[in-house]
Image (cartoon, helix red, strand yellow):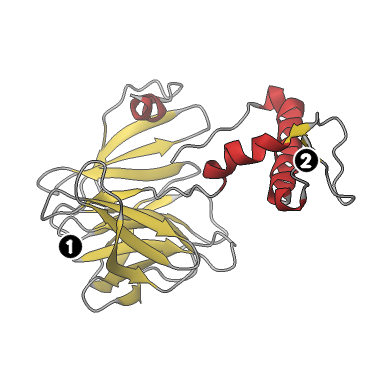
Amino acid sequence: MYSSTYPSRFGGYASFLSRALVVLLALLSSVSQASAQNDVISPGKNIDASGVPPIPSSLAHDVQPYIGMYGLPLAGWNPEKREIWLKGLSTATWISRVGSPGAMPEVSSIYIPAGGIYDIYIQPQGKYLAYTRDLNGDESFNLYLFDLVAHKSTLLSDGKTRSTEPVWSNAGDKIVYSSSPSGGKGVNLRLLNPFDPKTDHPLAQSSSGYFKAYDWSPDDKRIVFCDFSSNTASSLWLIDPETGRKTIVSPSDRSVDLCATRSKR
């Protein structure tokens, strides 16, 4: 999936392009009403096409293959065989499989009949997945566990905090995730055994920054996370999931946005 945004200094130009694109799509959708003898598409009375140049009728035919394009983002790899999984996020959520390079995606049996799911996170063993979901677009995300065999969802978070970005341990028996307490400051790290939600507990407390976990060490004895202290500064840390003891990895100069630099690489 690719997306593109214009920087703020191009705001006016981007706005013009957005309006022009909306007009173009609206006109193309009504091309069937245009006469075959016309060289241009005439806008309907309900469309303000001021400043938009004449649109050739032939353009509708040229862009038709691209109007209905829909992409499926990468969900992960099949843990048992050479196959990638793609995710479809809409009024329901499903997983499609691609078994070989260039093959068409095939819908799998993994299907969650629920809307509002923001993203899914597959257990390394491929038996469960975690997902974050909000209601009515309020972005108050809760964390859920989904059993791929029983096709059953279980709420993991407390339903009161904003829970996002879960990361599975390599053994598949723990999840670390970011949590924003209601009325509190900062974004903390919490840890739980997803098969026993009562084990959910704080791991690292942030005073005002944003804690985001990225990965576990191969032996699951350390977790690497970033402390985003501001929009331009961050630091990289290791934390012991048993004791909560933190060790800084990045230089002490917090004016460097180290985590953003590493992600770009």
Q: Is residue 121 above or below residue 142?
A: above
Image quarter where the N terminus lies is top left
Front-most of residues 136 and 75: 75
Q: Residues within 10 Å of mark 1 (few under 14, many from 20)?
A: some
Residue 210: give x, y in percent of width and height: 45, 43
What element does badge 2 sit on?
Answer: loop
Identify the residue at image location x=59%, y=32%: 5
Distance of mark 1 from mark 2, alpha carbons?
67 Å
Q: Is residue 217 above or below residue 181?
A: above
Type of amino acid under label 2: Gln
Left or right, residue 41 beside residue 78: right
Front-most of residues 59 and 144: 59
Image quarter where the C terminus lies is top left
Left or right, residue 115 beside residue 96: right
Front-most of residues 14 and 164: 14
What element does badge 1 sit on?
Answer: loop
Mark drawn on residue 148: none
Residue 194: give x, y in percent of width and height: 26, 67
Quadrant in the picture for residue 256 = top left
Q: Is residue 246 visible?
A: no
Identify the residue at image location x=31%, y=66%: 200
Q: Is residue 141 visible?
A: yes
**What residue does disc 2 label?**
37
Quadrant in the picture for residue 217 = top left
Type of amino acid under label 1: Asp
Residue 9: give x, y in percent of width and height: 70, 22
Q: Is residue 246 above or below residue 197?
A: above
**First in sequence: mark 1 vs mark 2:** 2
Identify the residue at image location x=40%, y=37%: 227
Residue 187: give x, y in percent of width and height: 46, 49
**What residue does disc 1 label?**
173
